[in-house]
Image: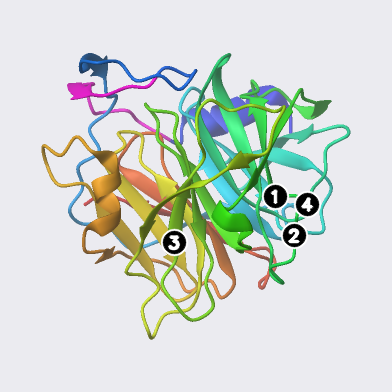
Amino acid sequence: MPPVRFLLLVTASFSFACAPKPATTLIPDLDGSIPDAAVEVDAGPSCACMQWGNPRNGGPIADPLVELSGLVASRAQPGVFFAHNDSGDSPRFFALATTGAIAQTYVLDGGLASDWEDIALGPCPTGTCVYLGDIGDNLRVRTNYAIYRVPEPTVLAGTTSVPWERFSYEYPGGAKHNSEAIFMHPVTGRLYLVTKEDASPSEVYRFPLPFDSSRTATLEFVATLTVPGATDRPLTAADVNVCGTAVLLRMYNRLVELRLPPGETDFERIFSVDPVTVPFANEGQGEAVAYGADGQSYFTASEKLVDPPPLYEYRCR
């Protein structure tokens, strides 16, 4: 798709009606240190939403995104998402519009895609980076879990190679876990992984700071969630909103939101709140969810069980 046409599509996709507001939070430096006192930061748009609308079909997702598993919104390029396929594809990801059109393909030359399952966006030493989770382990036998980090690319057109770093990790005690969900807090730069359990609630782990490609990091256990419940299917995706005040957790049969209580400054308290069920489309093999960069929307997508699969948008009422 020509660059001008794509930019017209994506620019029309979002309107930022929410003015930024100050917030007080503890921000660790990217080297892992945490300041002694809280500082004032720009929290971005207001993200408060108590009721979400029903799904709206934004358009068909184009080939070769035939097994869309990871989806995240760019915050610097309105209307742009970054997305990737499930296991079986090469090490690459795509720029995607809210219409489902693909503008650009990004290739990680020399990288591996053993089982990429989710994608996140967040701060890094170069500014903002895309984080790709090679985190899937259906048989619980892997010894090479990893996160890939790529500086957020500017969307142009065609196919391009991108620089990348690889951060290997393991679970505490050498445990094996399948995971299909990662997200990064937009201010602290903490990367969280959520496990995919077959018959019990998922667990949350965080990646220790600072990221170091020269060693294998040991994840830090954070919490056991209350989902999936006894009647739910496994958890397949997660995302955090641009304000760092809510988290979406996707299961095959349900989508829930965790909302940080007003005034709460400890983000990780969010994992102990009661989940709120929110609207979702019946997508069958739904494995992707992402908040919009405006703080007032979210999006879902499925693997290719229908041809072509749609990208669904949900707006705050």
Q: Secondary structure at mark 2?
A: loop
Residue drawn at point x = 65 percent, y = 53 percent: 135
**What residue sits right under mark 4 in the picture?**
64
Q: Which residue is mark 1?
A: 145
Is residue 15 one of those drawn in magenta?
yes
Which range of residues does the magenta coloring cover?
Answer: 14-28
Q: Quadrant of the N terminus?
A: top right
The answer to whether 9 is drawn above or below residue 145 in the figure is above
- Rendered location of residue 175, percent (x, y): 60, 61
Front-most of residues 85 and 138: 138
Determine the CA span between mark 4 and mark 3.
Answer: 32 Å
Task: Find residue 104 and report its image quarter.
Answer: top right
Separation of marks 2 and 1 at Cα, in angstroms? 7 Å
Marks 2 & 1, CB-CB < 8 Å contact: yes
* Residue lying furthest front: 173
Relative side of 153 to 113, left or right: left
Q: Which residue is mark 2?
A: 142
Q: Which residue is mark 3?
A: 203
Bin the neighbour count of mark 2 within 10 Å (Cα to Cα): few under 14, some 14-19, many 20 and up: some
Q: Identify which residue, 187 or 302, lies in the foreground.
A: 187
Q: Nearer the viewer, residue 62 or 264?
A: 264
Identity, as a three-letter code, of the amino acid under mark 2: Arg
Assign a secondary structure to mark 3. Answer: strand
Q: Tell me what residue is drawn at x 11 percent, y 42 percent.
A: 262
Q: How far apart in space, not on screen, are marks 3 and 2 (Cα)?
A: 18 Å
Give the mark, 3 or 2, whose residue is nearer the N terminus.
2
Q: State the residue at coordinates (38%, 28%).
A: 188
The type of residue carrying mark 4 is: Pro
Residue 250 at x, y = what percent? 44, 63
Image quadrant assignment for residue 280: bottom left
Locate residue 117, reporting x and y percent.
64, 55
